[in-house]
Image: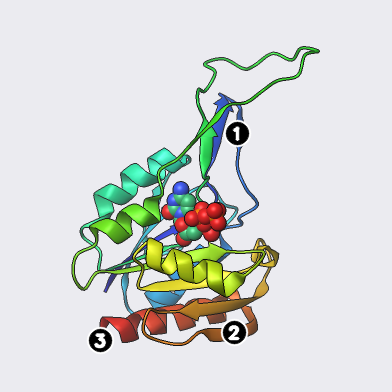
Amino acid sequence: MRILITAGGTREYIDPVRFISNASSGRMGYALVRAALRAGHKVTLITAPTGQRPPKGAKVVEVETAAQMFESLKKHFEKCDCLIMAAAVSDYTPTRTAKTKIKKSNKSLVLKLKPTADILKWAGKHKRKKQIVVGFALEDRDLRQNAEIKLKEKNLDMIIANTSAAIGAGKSTVQIKTPDHKWLRFLQATKATVARQIIREVESISG
Ligand code: CTP
């Protein structure tokens, strides 16, 4: 299969040297790239900045912001058989980015943010028949209920749910659901193990 994977936390710039981001390490996304390559798939990775080494054998596209990730994804989505959206995309971005570095003052500074596009929702809406779209859900309460809402609302073929304890961690408890099957649970599994399992599940859906 041709698998498109996104990874890393996007950066939303306030001025040329400052940005809003999140604690995503990119480890899950990169583990997925390695697992997919090992299973013989063709992989394109769209990655926001991470401390990870670029995996050999995948086509790598580097982006920074949610808007750039969306643009790149729209370019590559049509040619893939499966999208796995492991990136931690910022839900908000500053309404404007200052052209020059903001100088400090004694007054409080108010940042105005606007919502970014939901890339995964766009993919779920525009997918072809047989194209597989996989999303992640990071939930700190009502994990299964909230993840199932995302599965339905974003028209996904699989959702991988975990808690915020997974961010930056080597091991985590992950739960996986497809529309037609019960929840699968992986207790304290490494990201490499979870990645292998996700690729296997994707292969079984694709038939
Ligand atoms: N996602 C996306 N575009 C966004 C935000 C999120 O494509 N602007 C994707 C993520 O890559 C992930 C999934 O949506 O695969 C769910 O992300 P999550 O942060 O758990 O949920 P949200 O949809 O952002 O909802 P909320 O933060 O309110 O839980």
Quadrant for the N terminus in the image:
bottom left
Front residue of 153 and 82: 153
| Separation (CA) of disc 2 from disc 1 | 34 Å
Disc 2 marks which residue? Answer: 186
SS type, badge 1: strand
Disc 1 marks which residue? Answer: 19
* Of pointers 3 and 2, the one earlier in the residue sequence: 2
Question: Which residue is at 55% across, 79% downward?
Answer: 175
Front residue of 78 and 175: 175
Q: Amino acid at mark 2?
A: Phe
Task: Identify the mark at residue 123; answer none if there is no mark.
Answer: none
What is the x, y in percent for residue 70? 36, 45
Q: Quadrant of residue 154?
A: bottom left
Q: Are marks 1 and 3 in contact (CB under 8 Å)?
A: no
What is the x, y in percent for residue 41? 31, 74
Disc 3 marks which residue? Answer: 207
Q: Quadrant of residue 179?
A: bottom left
Q: Amino acid at mark 3?
A: Gly
Whether residue 142 is situated above or below residue 79 in the rendered picture = below
Q: Residues within 10 Å of mark 3 (few under 14, many from 20)?
A: few
SS type, badge 3: loop
